Amino acid sequence: MKVFLRMFFSAVCAAMVCACSIGSSGPASPVEKSYDSLGPIVVSYLPVIESDSVDKWGLVRPDGTMFVSNRFESEPSAVVNGYFSVKGQDGVSVWRALPAPAPVEGLSGLMSAGAMSSDLMPVARKGKRIELVDGTGVVRMELTSINGREIVRAAPYFADGVLAVYTHDGLWGGITPDGEMALEPVYDTMPVFSENIAAVSRTVEESVDSLTTRRMTRYYLVNNAGRVVFTFPRNVKPKGCMHGGRIVVETAGGHLAMLGLDGRIYDIDPKVKTVGGLSREYVVWGDRTNHYGLLDGALRELTGARFRSIAIADSNRFLVEDADGRYAVVDSVGRTKVRLTGFDRVSWLGSMGHAIVSPFRLAGSGYAGTVLLDLRGHRLGLGPFRSFSTAVTLMEDDCVHSDYFNSQAAAHAIVAPLTSEGWGRASIGMVIGRLAEMIDETNARDESLVFARDSLYGCTVEAVAFSNRCLGRDSIAGDSLRVFYPDSMARVRFISVDAIVPPRRFGEIVEHASPELVERGFRAGKLRDAYAVYESPTTIVALTPRNDMKGMTVYVMDRLFYETEGPRIISEAENTWRRLLNPEKKTGL
């Protein structure tokens, strides 16, 4: 199924924008051109401020030499697959790095921008849906609604050919670079793919007996084609991502184990309380005191938990911090190969996020700044740098967010179920118990009933019917079994439909709802900024802002109820409006 409104197939040739003379870079070296051989998502340059800089940012190469000096007023992102982003006064702009840094035409003033992967980058413009653009700035795809469910968030980049997307009703799915659904948006957790496998969870209903069901969280492994390849037993849940064909899991009692793609679970020593890193050959394990050691691929202990931290670097090389806060490069049995002295902190840069690799090795930081190091402890380049960053995007939560809201579609979702007698399957005067799928002790004593919930086009709707009596009555059967049945005297007095929508959209929704209400036989009664009242021969409909200021409420009433309760509803709407009113803009929430 396609999730985009349109794709742009026309071949567009974009003219290269020349770089500024300040800090312009030379042609790419053969090494720089080969960075993409490291993997599908590669960081090639990092943002720094040099020690003698005038507080402007530049970009440093992995060998410590400057690619661009004193160029940017604000901190740019790292260069990923040849592109990076810069934040300015009018928003975020996307730049290409080679042959010299230059902004990409058409990609400025953005709300946010992700990272380039699979030759596409997710970006968000104010008031628009998330778009996927190519390196020339051409929009290749717009992420539109999926059966009425708006995509409001996306991962910063494709991993294993899947971009994780999040719908307004709180579920995760994934799309491919050609716009096909890789995973339908039915999962509670973000699919993070590694080795073409992701661990996800989903809320499902399962039968307890012939009369009872319960909602449960189930865990699965899915591949990047959307197929479930493993369903976790009820007492087992995943911890982390797939590495080397296996994933860490938590079993009953909180014990850790390793699950292979063959479905077999391999025990880990009970003293292992956390797993801090995982590769095909090694496992970083932690004890109850948060100290770390190493296991081999067969889960046999190589070193005890005697380090504050361990990062898996190159083959048989590990960056460790010992109990005294000193850093070193050690081998797999903990023998020191290189001591890294004179630093308050040393970081491993070979991996800068999920699925992202780089030719950078180590960064040592101290009072004088940050320097780049190789795994032999040799200092690279001039340095130290006054400021140093490894952020691959400029987004706080590493997701691209859209503020797009289709107020016309939301208005339709709210008013389309209106009838001359009520809303949806509820009618004024009907026996309220007929709206219940089951009457039991949990709802028989209530005077109201939620009979409809839905979420479409960024609008979540909940419809409630109200009565002046309890929903049901009970009787005692011969076997002392309590049986509940609808009270025929408990009838629907009025209906309220709560709609959760983005702030300050009340006026727009009322404006779009008006023509639909007229088409359904309602005529305009009282129309104010704070509320709108429409009438039919038998029914009154009032549209008001919610008291909690998180959306709007539609009241469906008969004339008698409106005459007695209408003044209170309108008074509450006016009070809410006064709380929301912007002195500089007198209309619209």
Image: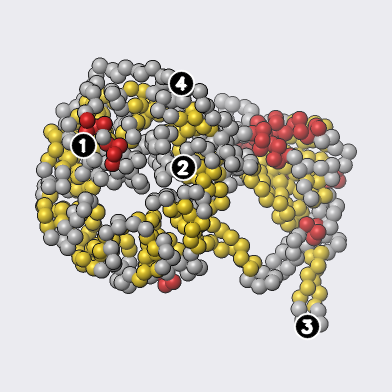
Label at residue 163: 2
Q: Around disc 4, counting alpha carbons within 10 Å, would you say few (fewer than 14), some (14 to 19), or many (20 or more)?
A: few
Do callouts 1 and 3 mark residues in contact (Cβ within 8 Å)? no
Q: Quadrant of residue 392?
A: top left
Q: In this figure, which residue is indicated by the disc labeled 4?
A: 12
Give the farthest residue toward the bottom. 479
Q: Secondary structure at mark 4?
A: loop
Find residue 95 and report its horizontal and vertical position in percent: 35, 26
Could you say which is closer to the camera, residue 181 or residue 575? 181
Q: Marks 2 and 1: in contact by CB < 8 Å?
A: no
Q: Residues within 10 Å of mark 2 (few under 14, many from 20)?
A: many
| SS label for mark 1 | loop
**Marks 1 and 2, Cα distance to the nearest angstrom?**
28 Å
Q: Nearer the viewer, residue 536 or 563?
A: 536
Residue tagged 1: 62
Q: CA distance from mark 1 to mark 3?
A: 80 Å
Q: How many marks?
A: 4
What distance separates the C-alpha of mark 2 from that of mark 4? 24 Å
Q: Label 1 sits on what residue type?
A: Pro
Q: CA distance from mark 3 to mark 4?
A: 79 Å
Does the residue at mark 2 contact the one at mark 3 (Cβ under 8 Å)? no
